[in-house]
Every structure is written in C-alpha cells, then in structure tokens.
Image (tube, rainbow, N blue to C red):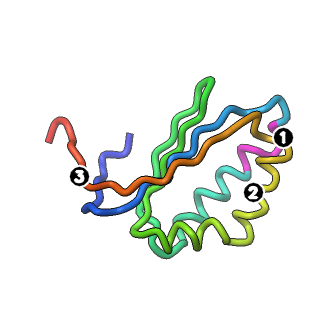
C-alpha cells in the first residue's frame, strides 16, 4: 500500500471492475495507462487491488485534471477496449476528498 497522502482537498476516481474471460493485452495496457497517468497534469497517484473484483483509485488535483485524463486519446482507446473486450462490468465513482486519516500516524 502506498503510504503517501496528499493535502486535501483533492479528487479520487474509484474504478471498480470485473474482468471478462478475454484479457489478452490487458496487463500491458494497464501498465501503459499507469505510466501515462503519471505524465498527466494534476495526477497525484493511485492505489490498486485485484482479486475477483478490481479496485483502482486514482487521485487528482481537480475535476479539470480528471476530465483531461478522460479525454486523453490513448486512454480513450483503452476505455474502448475495456468496454468491448476486457470488462464484464465496471463502475466509476468520482469523489472529493476532504480529509485523510492514516494509522499509524
């Protein structure tokens, strides 16, 4: 787990997914998207876990940064492949983070 914390307020994009049986190319694209996100203005970091359900939370400075990421051309291609092939289902939640508690502090 990443122990970094960011100074609130900031935004969290919570992506909850279940993979389909067709995952060819998924791991490579996921790695590319992580690398690309790190280059985006307003990107702060991310956390991810995958078992039966995948949960990835990316952290962003503001809503404009999230929108810029959503519209990024390589990310759009990954979204398309995800909808058409890789994901059985998914949800995206966007939340404003007002405070953070860490244990131990």
Position of residue 5 in the picture relative to residue 11 (left or right): left
Residue found at the far top of this picture: 52
Across and down, in percent, residue 74 comes to 73, 67
Position of residue 85 in the picture relative to residue 101 (left or right): right
The local crowd at label 2, few if under 14, some if 14 to 19, many if 20 or more residues have their Cα within 10 Å, is: some
Comparing 49 with 100, the one in front is 100
Query: Looking at the image, do the residues carrying marks 2 and 3 touch, with CB atoms under 8 Å apart?
Result: no
- For mark 3, give the secondary structure: loop
The region drawn magenta spans 23-28
Instruction: Residue under label 3, please give it.
Output: 99
Q: Earlier in the sequence, mark 3 or mark 1?
A: 1
Spatial CA distance of label 1 from label 2 is 13 Å
Residue 16 numbered mark, or none? none
Which label sits in the foreground, 3 or 1?
3
Residue 78 numbered mark, or none? 2
Q: Quadrant of the N terminus?
A: top left
Across and down, in percent, residue 11 comes to 40, 59
Across and down, in percent, residue 76 comes to 74, 64
Residue occupying image coordinates x 52% and y 48%: 93
Query: Is residue 2 in the magenta section?
Result: no
The local crowd at label 3, few if under 14, some if 14 to 19, many if 20 or more residues have their Cα within 10 Å, is: few
> Relative to 87, is 59 above or below?
below
Residue occupying image coordinates x 58% and y 32%: 50
- Dividing the picture into quadrants, the one containing residue 103 is top left
> Relative to 90, is 31 above or below?
below
> Relative to 57, is 19 above or below?
above
Which label sits in the foreground, 1 or 2?
2
Residue 24 numbered mark, or none? 1
Q: Earlier in the sequence, mark 1 or mark 2?
A: 1
Residue occupying image coordinates x 59% and y 61%: 35
Spatial CA distance of label 3 from label 1 is 39 Å
> Relative to 98, is 17 above or below?
above
């Amino acid at each position: 787990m990443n122990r970094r914390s960011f100074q609130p307020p900031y935004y969290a994009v919570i992506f909850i997914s279940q993979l389909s049986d067709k995952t060819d190319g998924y791991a490579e694209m996921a790695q590319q998207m992580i690398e690309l996100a790190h280059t985006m203005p307003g990107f702060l970091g991310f956390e991810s876990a995958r078992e039966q359900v995948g949960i990835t939370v990316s952290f962003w400075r503001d809503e404009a940064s999230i929108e810029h990421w959503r519209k990024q051309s390589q990310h759009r291609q990954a979204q398309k492949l995800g909808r058409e092939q890789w994901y059985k289902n998914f949800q995206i939640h966007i939340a404003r983070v007002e405070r953070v508690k860490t244990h131990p502090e």
